[in-house]
């Protein structure tokens, strides 16, 4: 009997060792579309991947793919299909798919990316997750960039009425409508085309978060920026995983990964955006005049944004959700983080 007992114990130990060895071989492929120099990659995803390896004691490694597997709008589908294990992307690149998440992209949202990102994740967990707009993927985290501003070339930015007729590259559907309502002409174009459009005189300005201006090399092409409390706009991002890839991890590793994802990643991402904004401000200090929106400007932007707010409200109503109550909760979360 003692011999049998030893055999059983040895077999269990061998199985445990075999399982541990197998777990150490798990490599998750992370696909994206941005260059290694972009803040999302170097300051958010890369440090997070290192954290995942650390908290799983090396059992889970994340491999960043060298080349995109598809264009930006397809990133969420790459994760859902399993073509990639993990992807990041912009919610609005798949127009209408994440309608509820427009609540984190409205004007006057947050003064820092950290506050906006953390509050966004908290509201997602409390109110938005159950609506299943991200059905088909495991949401690892959500985040926003810093307050968006309007950058122009050789024009006054305040009063905002001075920009009537200006051709402005818009940052997706969130800025398209109210730009037109401010009597400017919206121009739909990808962010990387901003330099060509500005230098060629095709547009007069563009919406961007501060960090994007030097990144896209337009800091010598713009002369002034209109800043708005909480941002003229914000853009929401996701970090998502194929659910089958997540399920094949051990419960311990799943828990460990979520400890450094969720709010922790949202905070990391927001802080990285804020540092990038600060660095960009230093680059533009002697090049671009930053003009704070006057009370009249704010009032005009609020008026122009009313149809946009109504559109987001309608999306909530279709899901049976109380837009005003959730927006109030979101604002409270933003203030709570900004007050820390």
Image (cartoon, rainbow, N blue to C red):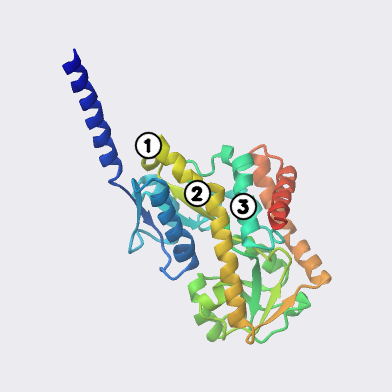
Residue 221: where, in percent of width, then height? 57, 85
Percent from the top left, x then y, of residue 285? Answer: 64, 83
**What residue sits right under mark 2 in the picture?**
261
Instruction: Classify mark 2: helix, strand or loop.
Output: loop
Q: CA distance from mark 1 to mark 2?
A: 16 Å
Q: Earlier in the sequence, mark 1 or mark 3?
A: 3
**Residue 178 occupies which quadrant of the picture?**
bottom right
Q: Residues within 10 Å of mark 1 (few under 14, many from 20)?
A: few
- Extreme residue toward the right, this view: 296
Q: Disc number at residue 250?
A: 1
Residue 139, compared with residue 224, is above or below; it is above
Compute the Cα span from label 1 to label 3.
27 Å
Expressed as whole percent of the image width and height from the top left, the position of residue 323 reads 71, 44
Image: 316 above or below 172:
above
Q: Mark 3 or mark 2, which is nearer the start of the sequence?
A: 3
Q: Are marks 2 and 3 in contact (CB under 8 Å)?
A: no
Camera-nearest residue between 50 and 261: 50
Say which of 256 and 159 sits in front: 256
């Amino acid at each position: 009997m003692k011999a049998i007992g030893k055999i059983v114990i040895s077999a269990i130990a061998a199985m445990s060792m075999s399982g541990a060895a197998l777990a150490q071989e798990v490599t998750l492929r992370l696909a994206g579309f941005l260059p290694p120099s972009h803040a999302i990659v170097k300051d958010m995803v890369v440090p997070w991947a290192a954290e995942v390896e650390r908290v799983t004691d090396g059992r889970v490694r994340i491999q960043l793919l060298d080349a995109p597997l598809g264009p930006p709008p397809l990133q969420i589908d790459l994760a859902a299909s399993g073509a990639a294990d993990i992807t990041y992307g912009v919610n609005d690149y798949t127009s209408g798919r994440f309608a509820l998440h427009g609540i984190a992209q409205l004007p006057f949202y947050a003064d820092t990316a950290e506050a906006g990102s953390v509050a966004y994740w908290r509201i997602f967990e409390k109110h938005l997750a159950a609506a299943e707009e991200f059905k088909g993927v495991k949401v690892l985290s959500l985040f926003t960039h810093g307050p968006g501003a309007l950058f122009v070339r050789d024009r006054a930015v305040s009063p905002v009425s001075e920009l009537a007729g200006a051709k402005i590259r818009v940052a997706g559907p969130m800025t398209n409508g109210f730009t037109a309502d401010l009597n400017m002409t919206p121009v739909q174009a990808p962010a990387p085309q901003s330099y060509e459009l500005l230098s060629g005189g095709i547009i007069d300005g563009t919406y961007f978060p501060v960090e994007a201006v030097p990144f896209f090399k337009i800091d010598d092409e713009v002369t002034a920026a209109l800043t708005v409390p909480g941002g003229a706009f914000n853009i929401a991002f996701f970090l998502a995983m194929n659910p089958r890839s997540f399920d094949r991890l051990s419960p311990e590793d799943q828990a460990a990964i979520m400890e450094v994802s969720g709010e922790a990643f949202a905070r990391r991402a927001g802080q990285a955006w804020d540092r990038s904004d600060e660095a960009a401000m230093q680059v533009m200090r002697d090049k671009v005049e930053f003009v704070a929106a006057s009370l009249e400007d704010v009032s005009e932007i609020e008026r122009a944004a009313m149809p946009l707010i109504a559109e987001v409200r309608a999306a909530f109503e279709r899901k049976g959700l109380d837009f005003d109550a959730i927006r109030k909760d979101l604002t409270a979360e933003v203030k709570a983080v900004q007050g820390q």
